[in-house]
Every structure is written in structure tokens, then in C-alpha cells.
Image: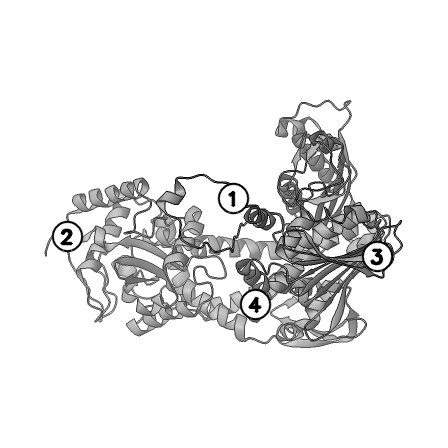
């Protein structure tokens, strides 16, 4: 987990050279604030620390209450042992704990907390009040602490045995973090709920409840468990009976020689494994998994954690059998304390494991054994497979071709240079050219790039677009013109290649902003560069130079040259318009369907009911929620899995609720957008090209079409080439 250190205290003066020559200790208060910011990174971690304190105190009931999703109040109350009066002064001081006396105690650790950082850090980041009653005390005490963890007031209070910790205005001492927290409040709240579920599933007999009260006074219950002592019963309490019905028990299976060899493990089947586990996972049958990896819970000795290699292994194996969904996972690994190091990160979510490769091999063997009756590829309809193969072949030839691959191919010969009569002819001609010209020599590719660049740098006028003649005369349209140039190719190529070498040697140069290659494996880097250096308003400022190969628009912004895929960019614009404005047709259900939702999911659905209506879903809400109508369109029937997907999306980021659509609806919109967009092979006027490029400034994510095809890439910086052009 990324850690951010934010120090809000402002210095009285800026550091000087004299200041920097003297090494001095940082004052205690500053150290405390820095360290506190590293320990408690989010609302979820604040809740985690308080819940773990309650578990360590022997609680069997833990109640959590929030106001305005935790921005005003986070309160955790338990019925544990309480705090003895003698421990009040050190309760919130740094590194004070009853769980360790020396370092060797870590090897015998049986508690969740041990470093004495939680309450101290929370004091530094919030206004903390603790009400506690020890079993031997006659009355409870209410304690208020300052940001340094010192008691500022104490008074008699009434409560049963146990402890209540109240955090108000969390992150207020760090204004930057507080602003980010409130900006992403619903997402932070959702992450807190998901981490709370991890504790609720553990079979330790603890009853959990969690509620939230909004600023308007509406109170909702988010979690209510019965404290069962089996994982399956707790799954029902948290996620409902339907989730349990799709789960498989995964018994521990010993890894055979092939898997042991794969992981480089020297282990004999007769040797005793140093660990065991309790493992539940979704069936790999299609429809049994989930649309996202939001319900995956991993533990080491009942401690929720994030063992990245195990998480990756489980998901990769599952998707070999069901590549459309993600599994629900509950995996609790039991081993001796001396074989695991949880003292890696301040939040203890990352762990180091001894015998990790043997564990990975065992998990893999166990999953493969559990899924052995299932086919690795699920095929339901031969005709559909045939159609799928045809679609895939077309996408490989047309849609997934990188811009530079298309750019490098020669234009049509004189006999085929006229615009295609229809879309089918356009696609077939383009595909044939793809195959014929896929092996251009390197010099030819570079000469094409250099010639176009030189031509464009020579003609700065925007009066009319320029068509570059590469392979000989082209008769395209009367308004286009050919520009013969005399080029010193050798000098240009030498300068171009030297510049590429200089880019690698001086990556911090301010002259050139775009260094990524135009290739599929460089797509991510290219998109990051474009997003950094191209603002939305820049698209309206781009000069339209011309149309290349009846499929691409060449544009110029200052000294940078870009190539825009006319079909991909129009498709993305049309797609986002459909995303924003379309209201799905719906069909009323004769028999409303009861939805089994978690309390958090129920709250999200009710809060965003209008978003669901826009997608064709209607509900009857009350004590239970019933689905009363579903969206219909283009051969797909949507239901509960799509509702779950939308709930997850809204919990992650409800600021994009206008664009929140299930993946199957997005696929429908992508097909509609593709059919109505400008096709490859269509000759465009200057106005049409200008409109297509200007529309990119209205697109939220302008760098890829909905099918993943790049919309725009940088070609070259013209200032590098103009010195070598010989006059005509």
C-alpha cells in the first residue's frame, strides 16, 4: 500500500544554506505527526486499528457507528475487558503496549496489535475521546486526549464493561489529506466496509454491527452479524444465502512433482507441511463468480492481509476456467508465528512468509484439484464460437492494428485509390493491404515518416489540407494537391536517429515531450505522455494538415505532429455521448425478484436509484428490495450480476455516476457507436476533420476507443527536421 507523508506545519522562514549545514534532531511533535501520517492512511485503517484493539481486549460484541460516512465521527464500542485506571496515562502515548516486552516476543505473538502506535497515531490525526470501564472498576471514565496522546480531561461516565473510542474530524490536522478524504468520501467509506467484512467472516464468535447516519439524519444499517463460529454461516450473515450457494470448499492437496519443479521447491510428500488453511472459492462455472474482485479475503493466522503473490495466483488460476469473472475468495492460512513477519508496513497488511514457494505450490495444487471436473474452456454454442472467431479475425486486422503499423503501409495503387463504395468494400481493401504490405523495409518506413514531416514543416498554411505522394501519383479528390519535394534523406535520417539517441541520454530535455514508440507494448506510456502534455482545449487549437490513407487525420500543434485515427476517435465520441445521455428501454417483471444485498450495497442502491433507472432497472424499496423491471436491448438480458457491478462502480467512485453503466450495456453502446462512426476509407472535408479533432476535447478519456484501439499518437517534433530540407 502506497504511503504518503504529509506535514502541514509551516516553517517560520524558508531554509537557508546556513540552516542546511547543521544537522539537528527533529522536534518530538513533528516526529509524532510525520509517523502518525504513515500509520493511519485512510478511514479503513482507522477502523481496522480500533476493531483489532477490541478483538485483543476479548470482545464478543463490536458496534461501529459513523456520521456522514466517517467524516464527522467514527466510533467503535466493545464489551471487552476495558482499560484499568493505571493504564490511562500511557494508553495513547507512542510505543506504549502491554503486548511486547522485548523483540523476541514477536515470534510468539498471539495478538493483532503490538507496537503501541494505533491510538497514539489516531490522537495526532483526530479529536479522540475514550470511554472505558474495567471489570474491576466501580464506574466508567470518559477521557479526552490531545494530539500528543496526553489526557486533557477525565470525568465519570456510565457504561457497561468495555471500551468506546470516538474519533471526530479525522485528518483535520492534515488539511491536504482531509480535503482528499472528503472529496473521495464514498469511496473511502466503501473500502472501510469491505475491510470490515474481512473481520466479520472470521469464525471467532464475535457479533459485529455497523451503521451510518447522514448529515440529513437518515440512519442505515450496513452490517449485522450473529457471531457464528463457522465461515459459511458468517458468509450468509454478510453476503446472503445466494453467495454461499456458489462457493466450493477447497481441501488442502499436496503438490506433485511438476508443480514443485515449477516453483523450484525441494519437498518430499512424506514431509509435514508447515501450514494449513481454510479455503472457500467461487465455483468456476460461468455465472458463479463476480464481475469484480471486490469480495476477496486473505488472512494469515486470522489477520486480514494482502499476500500479493497468493492473490495473483488464485485469480490467474480461476480465470483459466472462467475468464469472464472473478472469484469470491476466503483463504485463512494457519502457521506458526515464527514463520511469518507482519512487521513490514505500518498497517500490517503486507507480510513476509517463510516457505512461501511451498505455500504457493500447495494453493495451486489445491485449486486445480477443486476445479478438476471443469473444462478449462467453456463452450456453449458452436455457431457462436464461429461468429466469435470471425469477429476476432476482423478486430485483429482492422481495429487492433496500431496506428504506426497502418501508417507504415503504402497507400492503394492508382487502380484502387478511389473511395470504397461501401463499408464492406472499405474493410476488405484495408485488410488486403494489411496483409500485402506488412513487410516494408526499415528504410522505407523511415523515409515515409521523414517525407511527410518535411512536407508539413514546409507548408505552414491552413488554407487547405495537403496529401503526400509517396508511391507515385494519386488521384484522390480535386481539392487535394500533391507537393513534390527534393529531400536529403540521408542527412535527415542521420539527424532523426541521432536525436533518438540523444533522447535516451538526456531524458530530462524540455524540448521534446513525447518519447514513446508507437507500438502496442508502448500504449500505456504513450497515453500517459499525451494526458500530461495535451489539455482538452488544445484539440481546438490543432491545425488540420490533411488526411492520410483515407483513414487518418494528420494534425499539428506548435512543432509537434500527431496522427488521429478518424474512425476510433469518432467512435469514442459517439460512445461517450451514448454513455451520458441514453436511457435504456426496460421491461416490467411479472413477478418482482427479491434482491439479496449487503447493507452497504443496499444503501448504495437506494442512494443512486436514479442511476439504475437510467440503465433500465426499477426497484420496489422497503424492508426488502425487489427488482421490478430490467433493461432490454440487442439480445442481452441484464439482471442481478449487472446490478452488483454497478454498485461496485458507484462505491469506488460515485463522482462518475453519469457514466456508470454495466459492462454489457457498455458493449451494446460500443457496437452502436462503431456502426454510426466515420469509417476507414471515407474521404473527409476539412470541416469534417476539424470537427472530429475538436470533439476529442469533449471526451472524458480521449486516448482509446471502446474497443481498445488508439485514437491518437505523436509522430515527430518538426523542429528537429526543418534544418535539413533543401529548397524545391
> Which label's residue is closer to the chain start, 4 or 2?
4
Circle 1/circle 4 CB separation < 8 Å: no
Whether residue 41 is visible, yes or no, is: yes
Give the CA distance from mark 3 to mark 1: 38 Å
Secondary-structure class at tag 4: helix
* SS assignment at label 3: strand
Q: Which residue, given by chain and number where applicable, does mark 4 sit on? A: 655
Instruction: Name the spot of residue 578 as percent of width and height, x first.
Output: 52, 72
Q: Could you say which disc has been placed on residue 461 in the image?
A: none
Vertical order, 585 against 515 (above or below): below
Chain-order first, disc 2 or disc 3: 3
For the residues labelled 4 and 2, the Cα–Cα distance comes to: 51 Å
Element type at mark 2: loop
Q: Nearer the viewer, mark 1 or mark 2?
A: 1
Taking the spot 64% from the left edge, 75% from the top edge, the residue there is 610
- The answer to which of marks 3 and 1 sits earlier in the sequence is 1
For the residue pair 498 and 104, the one nearer the viewer reads as 104
The residue shown at (42%, 67%) is 570
Determine the CA span between mark 1 and mark 4. 40 Å
Query: In what element is the residue under mark 1?
Result: loop
Residue position for label 3: 140
Q: Position of residue 122 (x, y in %)?
A: 66, 53
Task: Please tell me whether mark 4 or mark 2 is closer to you in this view.
Answer: 4
Between 326 and 157, the one lying in front of the other is 157
> Separation of disc 2 and disc 3 at Cα?
87 Å
Could you give the CA–CA distance between mark 1 and mark 2, rounded to whole angstroms?
Answer: 61 Å
User: Contact (CB < 8 A) between labels 3 and 1?
Assistant: no
Q: Residue at x 70, y 72 (%)?
A: 606
Q: Which residue is mark 2?
A: 725
The C terminus sits in image quarter? bottom left
The residue tagged 1 is 26
Task: Answer yes or no: is residue 325 visible.
Answer: no
Amino acid at each position: 500500500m502506497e504511503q504518503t507523508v504529509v506535514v502541514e506545519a509551516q516553517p517560520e522562514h524558508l531554509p537557508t544554506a546556513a540552516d542546511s549545514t547543521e544537522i539537528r534532531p527533529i522536534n518530538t511533535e513533528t516526529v509524532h505527526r510525520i509517523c502518525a501520517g504513515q500509520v493511519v492512511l485512510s478511514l479503513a485503517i482507522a477502523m481496522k486499528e480500533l476493531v483489532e484493539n477490541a478483538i485483543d481486549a476479548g470482545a464478543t460484541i463490536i458496534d461501529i457507528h459513523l456520521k456522514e460516512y466517517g467524516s464527522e465521527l467514527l466510533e467503535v464500542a466493545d464489551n471487552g475487558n476495558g482499560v484499568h485506571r493505571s493504564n490511562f496515562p500511557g494508553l495513547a502515548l507512542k510505543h506504549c503496549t502491554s503486548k511486547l516486552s522485548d523483540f523476541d516476543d514477536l515470534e510468539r505473538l498471539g495478538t493483532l496489535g503490538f507496537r503501541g502506535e494505533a491510538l497514539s497515531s489516531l490522537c495526532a490525526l483526530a479529536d479522540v475521546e475514550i470511554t472505558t470501564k474495567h471489570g474491576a472498576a466501580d464506574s466508567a471514565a470518559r477521557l479526552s486526549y490531545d494530539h500528543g496522546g496526553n489526557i486533557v480531561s477525565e470525568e465519570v461516565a456510565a457504561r457497561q464493561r468495555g471500551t468506546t473510542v470516538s474519533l471526530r474530524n479525522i485528518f483535520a490536522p492534515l488539511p491536504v489529506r482531509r480535503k482528499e478524504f472528503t472529496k473521495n468520501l464514498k469511496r473511502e467509506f466503501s473500502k472501510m466496509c469491505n475491510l470490515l467484512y474481512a473481520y466479520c467472516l472470521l469464525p471467532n464468535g464475535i457479533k459485529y454491527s455497523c451503521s451510518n447516519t447522514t448529515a440529513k439524519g437518515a440512519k442505515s444499517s450496513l452490517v449485522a452479524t450473529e457471531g457464528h463460529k463457522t465461515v459459511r454461516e458468517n458468509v450468509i450473515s454478510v453476503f446472503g444465502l445466494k453467495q454461499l450457494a456458489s462457493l466450493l470448499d477447497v481441501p488442502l492437496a499436496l503438490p506433485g512433482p511438476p508443480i514443485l519443479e515449477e516453483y523450484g521447491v525441494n519437498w518430499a510428500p512424506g514431509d509435514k507441511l508447515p501450514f494449513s488453511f481454510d479455503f472457500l472459492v467461487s465455483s468456476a462455472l460461468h455465472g458463479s463468480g463476480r464481475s469484480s474482485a471486490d469480495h476477496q479475503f486473505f488472512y494469515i493466522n486470522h489477520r486480514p492481509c494482502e499476500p500479493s503473490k497468493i492473490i495473483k495466483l488464485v485469480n490467474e488460476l480461476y480465470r483459466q476456467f472462467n475468464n469472464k469473472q472473478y472469484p469470491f475468495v476466503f483463504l485463512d492460512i494457519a502457521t506458526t508465528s515464527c514463520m511469518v513477519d507482519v512487521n513490514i508496513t505500518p498497517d500490517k497488511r503486507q507480510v513476509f512468509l517463510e516457505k512461501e514457494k511451498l505455500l504457493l505450490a500447495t494453493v495451486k495444487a489445491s485449486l486445480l484439484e477443486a476445479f478438476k471436473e471443469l473444462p478449462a474452456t467453456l463452450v456453449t454454442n458452436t455457431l457462436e464460437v464461429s461468429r466469435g472467431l470471425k469477429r476476432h479475425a476482423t478486430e485483429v486486422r482492422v481495429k487492433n492494428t496500431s496506428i504506426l503499423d497502418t501508417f507504415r503501409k503504402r497507400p492503394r495503387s492508382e487502380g484502387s485509390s478511389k473511395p470504397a463504395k461501401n463499408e464492406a468494400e472499405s474493410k476488405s481493401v484495408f485488410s488486403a493491404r494489411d496483409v500485402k504490405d506488412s513487410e516494408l523495409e526499415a528504410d522505407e518506413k523511415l523515409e515515409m515518416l521523414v517525407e511527410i514531416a518535411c512536407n508539413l514543416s514546409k507548408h505552414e498554411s491552413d488554407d487547405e489540407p495537403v496529401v503526400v505522394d509517396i508511391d507515385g501519383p494519386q488521384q484522390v479528390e480535386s481539392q487535394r494537391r500533391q507537393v513534390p519535394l527534393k529531400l536529403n534523406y540521408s542527412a535527415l535520417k542521420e539527424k532523426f536517429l541521432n536525436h533518438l539517441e540523444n533522447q535516451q541520454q538526456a531524458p530530462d530535455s524540455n524540448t521534446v515531450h513525447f518519447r514513446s514508440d508507437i507500438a502496442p507494448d508502448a500504449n500505456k506510456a504513450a497515453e500517459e505522455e499525451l494526458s500530461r502534455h495535451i489539455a482538452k482545449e488544445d484539440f481546438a487549437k490543432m491545425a488540420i494538415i490533411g488526411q492520410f490513407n483515407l483513414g487518418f487525420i494528420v494534425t499539428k500543434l506548435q512543432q509537434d505532429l500527431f496522427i488521429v485515427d478518424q474512425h476510433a476517435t469518432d467512435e469514442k465520441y459517439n460512445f461517450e455521448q451514448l454513455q451520458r445521455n441514453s436511457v435504456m428501454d426496460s421491461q416490467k417483471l411479472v413477478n418482482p425478484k427479491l434482491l439479496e444485498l449487503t447493507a452497504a450495497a443496499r444503501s448504495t442502491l437506494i442512494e443512486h436509484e436514479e442511476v439504475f433507472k437510467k440503465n433500465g432497472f426499477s426497484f420496489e424499496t422497503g424492508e426488502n428490495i425487489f427488482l421490478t423491471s430490467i433493461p432490454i436491448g440487442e439480445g442481452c438480458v441484464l439482471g442481478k450480476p449487472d446490478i452488483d457491478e454497478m454498485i461496485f462502480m458507484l462505491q469506488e467512485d460515485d463522482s462518475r455516476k453519469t457514466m456508470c453503466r454495466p459492462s454489457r450495456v457498455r458493449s451494446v453502446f460500443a457496437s452502436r457507436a462503431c456502426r454510426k462512426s466515420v469509417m476507414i476509407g471515407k474521404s473527409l472535408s476539412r470541416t469534417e476533420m476539424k470537427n472530429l479533432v475538436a470533439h476529442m476535447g469533449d471526451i472524458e478519456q480521449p486516448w482509446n476507443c471502446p474497443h481498445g484501439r488508439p485514437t491518437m499518437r505523436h509522430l515527430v517534433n518538426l523542429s528537429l527536421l526543418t534544418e535539413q530540407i533543401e529548397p524545391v
